[in-house]
Amino acid sequence: MNNIVGTESKLMQTVKLVNSKGMELEVCNYGATLMALKIPNKNEQLINVIVGLPTAEEYANPEYQKHNFYLGSSIGRYAGRIAKGCFSLKGKQYQLETKSEVHLHGGSSGFDKKYWDIIETKQGRSPSIKMQLQSGHMEGGYPGNVTVTVQYELLESNALRIVYSATTDRPTVLNLTNHAYFNLDGEGSVSEQLLQINSNKILELDSKKCPTGRILPCSQTHYDFQQKSPVKHVPSKGLDDVYVLSQKPFSASLISKKSGICMKVLTKQPSMVVFTPLHFPDIDFYQNATYSLFPAICFETQNFPDAPNHSNFPSSVLHPGETYHNETVFDFSAGLISS
């Protein structure tokens, strides 16, 4: 049975979607944030595979936000880092907010800290929710009045489809993604979960995690996950790296033998930031979930970070009359896994 439930306070709204297979999605309009995503495991029990907070209100709590974890949030205007917080466009230089000489994920006025308008919900097969946000000219230092929409849809194949689109009234730069953290066991660690990344190239990063402009091969290095390997094989500090994607059947996959859940990530974006934090801060999580070392993993499908400052990177410029588009599908299946 499909079900949509809404409402909390005056500004904060939550919506629950359920498809015909029993897959559940909980979303709040603050940051257009994914709060929970429940998937049937190999025993047909629902497992929440997204790290979330206990209530929608917690996402707006300054005590949570100081950790900069962006749990399940929509990221913009520019996902990833922009070196020195500046870029030039049409002969004019724009200065953005920086911390340690880096602009990250849109800064303190980023889309993850905005109340989005819920403009459409759909019940029945493949239930969905669409939200919209207006970002004014020079908000956060970015040019252009930008209109952004995101649609979350639960497909009947037990997949979550996320579609971001945007338009602008003057040239600007834009790079959107969702910052969901996945753990296919719903708790503990992803260390033993099997990771595959269909990429043999990464962006070289400097000491501030900003791209240098060079693209490096990653075959037979610690960054090589072209073959399924346990997440624990990542470098000792974990991954926070940019994989260059090509058009392959899927961009990445994650498998848990414990829950029997397999997730595939499908996108046409040129890159994917894969992030494996070492640990989470001491905060309360959705339904009292507890996590340990390497608690979860992010698959941030997007354009290259710092693309406005590198002519050899795919362009991130959006012009009037154009529509930005970023579609990503997280496709789930469950069963006994032998390898």
Image (cartoon, grey):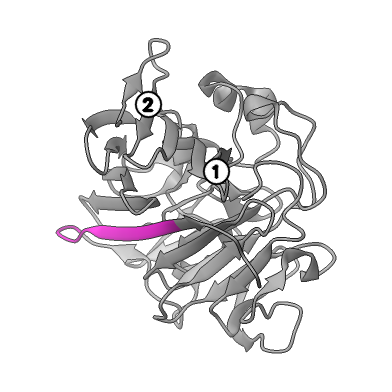
Depicted 105 relative to depicted 281: above or below: below
**Circle 1 is placed at which residue position?**
107
The residue furthest right is: 236
Write the residue at 44% across / 80% down: 311
Instruction: Compare residues 323 and 169 and report the one nearer the observer.
Output: 323
Identify the image quadrant of residue 217. Answer: bottom right
Residue 170 placement (x, y as % from top left): 23, 54
Q: Which residue lies at the image location 34% right of the left edge and 54% below the top edge?
A: 157
Q: Is residue 250 visible?
A: yes
| Rendering coords of residue 256 (x, y %) | 65, 58
Quadrant, the N terminus: top left
Whole-percent x and y of residue 284?
A: 71, 26
Give above or below for 94 relative to 287.
Answer: below
**Marked residue nearer the N-terminal end (1 or 2):** 2
SS state under label 1 = helix
The answer to which quarter of the image holds residue 324 is bottom left
| Image: magenta residue range | 320-331
Q: What amino acid is at disc 2?
A: Val
Asked if residue 155 is positioned above or below residue 45 in the image, the reply reads below
User: Disc 2 designates what residue?
Assistant: 15
Q: Residues within 10 Å of mark 1 (few under 14, many from 20)?
A: many
Residue 214 in sight: no
Rounded to the nearest whole Å, what is the CA distance between mark 1 and mark 2?
Answer: 26 Å
In this view of the protein, which residue sits in the foreground, 289 or 244?
289
User: In the image, what residue occupies the spot 67% across and 55% down?
Assistant: 101
> Which quadrant holds the C terminus?
bottom right
Q: Label 1 sits on what residue type?
A: Gly
Relative to 91, 84 lies left or right: right
Decide which of 325, 22 is in the foreground and name it.
Answer: 22
